Image (cartoon, rainbow, N blue to C red):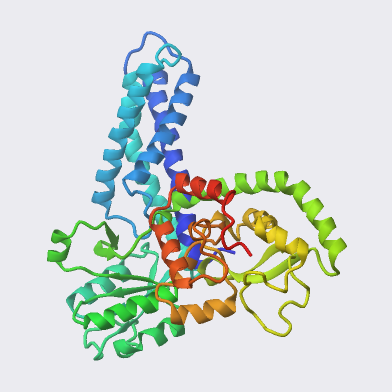
Amino acid sequence: MLRRQDVRAWTVGWTLLSDALAMYLAFACAWIGRFELGVIAVTDTPPIGNYVAAVTLWAGIILVVFQRLGLYNIRAPLPFLVEGAQVAQGMAISLAVLFALSFFLRAQFHFSRIAVLIMGALGIFWLLLLRKTLRVFWGRFLRERGLRVRTLVVGWGERGADLVSHVRSDVNSGREIVGVLADEAPADLPAGVPWLGRSDALEARIEEQNVDEVILATLHFPSRRISLWILACEQRLVSFRLVPDLFEVLASRVHLDFVSGVPLLGLGNFPLDHPVNRILKRAMDLVGALVGLLLSAPILLVAAAVIRLESRGPIFYMQERCGREGRPFRMYKLRTMRPDAEKETGPVWAQEKDPRRTRVGAFLRRYNLDEVPQFWNVLKGEMSLVGPRPERPVFVEQFKEEIRHYMPRHAYKPGMTGWAQVNGLRGNTPIEDRVRYDLYYFENWSLWFDLRILTATLFSFRNAY
């Protein structure tokens, strides 16, 4: 079932398909106009296979260029003129790259430059048309299923009124204004938009209204209160943004989002906030999980035999952990402790020379072999190869109140290994340090960084007990 939390990824996926389709439509129109209808005289018709190959390569180039230009940052659609200018810019860059490649591949790769230029012009038209069409029908689909982003506006005034007016008039914005918080009931509040009380009721209203996003419409609040609101949103994995003053827009170099034409400053975007990066990471996870399960099969067979020989009880150990967005899932491990390990103590962390471990279990934990079954969690999409280690719900509830910036580590999938773990931060080590390393990983994510961590994991045994 499609959930509100997954709408953005689905939107980007459909937009990718739409852009690829636009390129092939542009090719079909250019081919028919150039070679079939004879709009421009030609001496002979080249093999169509050359053009299909060129368009396929071109579509791939465009998707990469558009990603770099931010055209798949679908958290909020760009105004039409802004999007049109960026699409034209991306088209020009992709044409330059395609012509450069054709120069080196000319001996095997012949096609008419005029036809390609026609495709470029038609491509801009089809890209904008299909994007607009997709936005209309996708927005209607989300509205019918109640999957719009539930937005709570804090503060009022001219900027708050403009924001609410623009969002409500733009049926394809993907947002639903659930209400407004202001210290006094606004006299000009539009019909159908409820006043939900004073701004100090923010945390209660987030829970009560099942809010996905908080937008601060005015900065006329004490900075201390705004800091607490940001922290409250972090703890609940709710997006927090604000409407900037014109001076702030001109004086700042941050990237702007737009909601129905209203500029918004985003706070703390990470590389994995871009769905294309998540798609790349998921592709690596699928390949890695399949290869990992295949290569680890002999280890699992041997481990299963010795675990069963040493002590009674199950071979595998399943424990509830908190995954992406804090959702619980069952994580698989090879059993390394007595079946009644927490009968007397309740949930506790493992310690060095933990008496609850079996002899086989101590060996498996020492060399990280007890984590091998989590390749199955990765294949199911509950975990990633690399990311923050998942924690049990009882500890998450404790840490989110005690440790600042703890909950943002749940904005993405947990991992079999992570930057904190390869630096020895596991077992009975300070949770504050782990959070700091997890946030560093998010801020600096790349596929190369993931590969570096995976390689380091093979030689990282510090505090593995």
Residue 465, picture quadrant: bottom right
- Please state the horizontal and vertical placement of residue 229, each as a whole percent of the image: 33, 79
- Would you say residue 334 is visible in this rendering? no
Q: In the shown orientation, is residue 156 left or right of residue 373?
A: left
Above or below, 34 against 145 in this view is above
Labels in figure, total: 0
Residue 125, picture quadrant: top left
Residue lying at the far front of the rendered structure: 353
Q: In the shown orientation, is residue 17 left or right of residue 460?
A: left
Residue 373, picture quadrant: bottom right
- Please state the horizontal and vertical placement of residue 12, each as a whole percent of the image: 44, 52
Above or below, 276 against 436 in this view is above
Q: Nearer the viewer, residue 429 or 92?
A: 429
Above or below, 155 against 256 in this view is below
The residue sitting at 33% across, 13% down in the picture is 41
Q: Nearer the viewer, residue 96 or 46?
A: 96
Residue lying at the far top of the rendered structure: 43
- Please state the horizontal and vertical placement of residue 22, each as a whole percent of the image: 41, 39
The residue sitting at 39% across, 84% down in the picture is 203
The N terminus appears in which quarter of the rendering?
bottom right
Q: In the shown orientation, is residue 332 left or right of residue 327?
A: right
- Please state the horizontal and vertical placement of residue 11, each as a whole percent of the image: 45, 55
Q: Nearer the viewer, residue 198 or 224?
A: 224
The residue sitting at 38% across, 68% down in the picture is 175
Q: Nearer the viewer, residue 199 or 410?
A: 410
- Would you say residue 269 is visible in this rendering? yes
The residue sitting at 74% across, 70% down in the picture is 337
